[in-house]
Amino acid sequence: MKSKAKYDEEELEILKAWETGTLRPVADSAEQAKSHRAAAEATFKKDQRLNIRISSRDLKNLQARALEEGVPYQTFAASLLHKYVSGHLVSQR
């Protein structure tokens, strides 16, 4: 188990509720779990193909960064695109 110093404020609040027995499941937990599972599956579903032309230099840099992250470069590229279009990665202009 992690020491309490490694928990953030929200995690400490949850841990305290668990330890005191005040943590209670939500009424529709099965329905919520099903909804979250469906959302996760839809997020990771790869049902379209994208073919692009990029410079050799950009491809080599992309492959190098993917290697640093320990993932295949195509997976890395798809992750970058997903993060950008979902607003979690912003352009540095």
Image (spheres, helix red, strand yellow):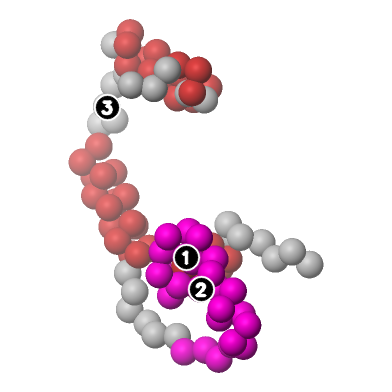
Label 1: element kind:
helix
x and y percentages locating residue 25 in the rendered image: 27, 27
Task: From the image, tell me which residue sits under label 1.
Answer: 67
Q: Quadrant of the C terminus?
A: bottom right
Instruction: Give whichever of discs 3 and 1 has the lower sequence position.
Output: 3
Q: Amino acid at mark 3?
A: Pro
x and y percentages locating residue 21 in the rendered image: 29, 11
Principal SS element in the magenta part? helix
Q: Residue at x 34, y 74 (%)?
A: 46
Which label belongs to residue 63?
2
Q: Residue at x 45, y 72 (%)?
A: 73
Of tags 3 and 2, which is closer to the observer?
2
Q: Is residue 69 magenta?
A: yes
x and y percentages locating residue 76 in the rendered image: 47, 68
Which image quadrant is residue 26 in? top left
Asked if labels 1 and 2 touch by Cβ distance under 8 angstroms, the answer is yes
Instruction: Give whichever of discs 3 and 2 has the lower sequence position.
Output: 3
Q: Is residue 34 left or right of residue 17?
A: left
Q: Amino acid at mark 2?
A: Gln
Label 2: element kind:
helix
